[in-house]
Amino acid sequence: MERFEKFAWWLSWRKDVIEYCHSCDRCQKANKATGKRFGFMIHIQEQSTPWEVAHMDWVTALPPGGDKIHNACYVIVDRCSKAPIFLPCHKDDTAIDIALLIWSRVISHTGLFKNIISDRDPRFTSAL
């Protein structure tokens, strides 16, 4: 910054230089990443047996509905058949709440999953 100040100056120069450096493609490629590292990508094989592998994710920001005023939906999709299961829930449900919901409403019909694919929601990856 001091080197730049020797050659040019204007009222908002410091803010403009910082903004330019953050948006410069060359600068971003040269700088070391400081964020959280992602896990390794793995190939997920196609399944021939239903409900061995399930994809799970939240749908939130829904308008309230039902007698218990649910405002979110937990979606479980079978990798083999692409059959979805929609579980009404609340957006502030904990991992334990969802585990109990899955145990009582899904596992009894499908059996236990061999693998679960999710986006590693903080509700599940944080300490319980």
Image (cartoon, rainbow, N blue to C red):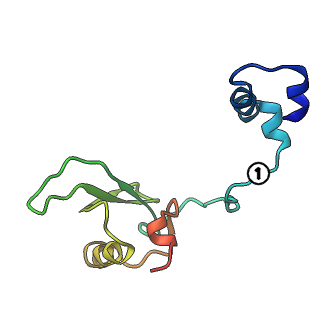
Is any part of residue 49 visible from this angle? Answer: no
Q: Residue at x 70, y 26 (%)?
A: 16
Query: Crowding at label 1, few (<14), some or many (≥20) Cα neighbours within 10 Å?
Result: few
Q: Which residue is mark 1?
A: 33
Image height of 89 relative to 60, above or below: below
Q: Residue at x 14, y 52 (%)?
A: 65
Q: Nearer the viewer, residue 84 or 46?
A: 84
Q: Is residue 114 above or below residue 3?
A: below
Q: Quadrant of residue 37?
A: bottom right
At a point 46% along the width and 59% down the height, the residue shown is 79
Quadrant of the image occupied by residue 104: bottom left
User: For the N terminus, which image quadrant?
Assistant: top right
Q: Position of residue 85 (x, y in %)?
A: 30, 60
Q: Is residue 100 left or right of residue 66?
A: right
Find residue 21 and report its horizontal and vertical position in percent: 76, 33
Judging depth in this view, the residue of 66 and 51 nearest the camera is: 66
